[in-house]
Image: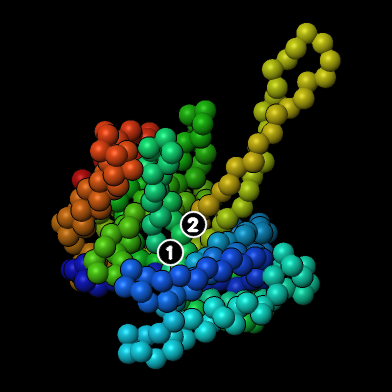
Amino acid sequence: MKNLSVQATNKLNIVGKLLDTTFREGKTKDEKPYESCNFTVRVTQMVNGVEETSEIPVSLFASKFTNAGKPHPGYKNIQDMKDWKTVQDYGEAEATMVRMTSASVRENNYVSRAKQLVNGWQINTSFINEGGKNEIASFNIDIFIMDMHPEIDREGEETGRLIIKGAVVQYGGALDVIEFVVEGADQVEYISRNWEINTTVNVGGRIRVTSQEEKKAASSGSWGEELPETSTRMVRELVITRGSDEPFEESFAYDPAEIKKAFNARKARLEQMQIDAGKNSAPKASASNTPKQYSWE
């Protein structure tokens, strides 16, 4: 079986219009200068037969010099970006088309003001290029399946979608836990029948970062028009649209015992994060985000 020194395949392909950019200069703890750029790419693509427009945030970081003391190409890349045109400043027609083939996704955890642990994911890249024609935001990732279950809505009803919790082995054997969704009865049925918890598979699909408007009826008064209440919810999903026919053979799969060790280390790190944020007070549990007991444990 593969050990955790073997980093999982984790490749994102993003092509779209540069929506906005935010630059920041600074120095590391050892006084090395760096620059970072947080930017958003607008991508219109087909997801399970439906056209969607996503606005995908990406982070790019580079020190000014390499460890050998030479100019860092990533740093120059960020400098070049300052001359590119964004949708925000120049409009959709004139905005620079950009593409990334070296991007990856990783876990992004933080403690909210309410001292609750929030789990999510973020996209990082080491380089971004000008150009590209066919807009796309896709992923190709090897995951160790930790859990699979039907999605339940706020009313307690099944939505017909499948939620998959996947462990992604990152650099140095660090373990990230990332959530994926599966849509469509045929795809949900196939995966439920052919994939299993405690196995390694490859997943591919589309990145979705959109906003959804939710409406609910206002409480009725004694007279006059009832005005529905509306709210906007941000949707950030990794939608599986393809993958392995069946789990990897043992020699290409991760060892469940090694995954469990890395998961326990991750769990302890997140618990310490909550304690530190609460100034040594007991962490408050979050019903939806605190690490749970997975089926494979």
Q: Which mark is residue 105?
A: 1
Which residue is drawn at the image coordinates 29% and 64% (left, top)? 169
Counting from the top left corner in percent of width and height, residue 57 is at 55, 62
Amino acid residing under circle 2: Leu
User: Left of 82 or right of it: where is 3?
Assistant: left
How packed mark 2 is, by other alpha carbons closer than 10 Å (few <14, some 14-19, many 20 or more), is: many
Task: Report the quarter where the C terminus lies.
Answer: top left
- Residue 170, image quadrant: bottom left
Q: Which mark is residue 121?
A: none
Per the model, the C-alpha gap separating discs 2 and 1 is 10 Å
How packed mark 1 is, by other alpha carbons closer than 10 Å (few <14, some 14-19, many 20 or more), is: many
Task: Report the quarter where the N terminus lies.
Answer: bottom left
Q: Observer-nearest residue: 256 or 220?
A: 220
Instruction: Kindly state the secondary structure of the residue where label 2 is placed.
Output: strand
Which residue is drawn at the image coordinates 40% and 66% (left, top)? 141
Q: In the displayed image of the protein, which residue is found farthest to the front?
A: 31
Counting from the top left corner in percent of width and height, residue 227 is at 77, 25
Circle 2 sits on which residue? 238
Q: Is residue 64 visible in this depiction of the protein?
A: yes
Mark closest to the chain's N terminus, 2 or 1: 1
Counting from the top left corner in percent of width and height, residue 263 is at 23, 53
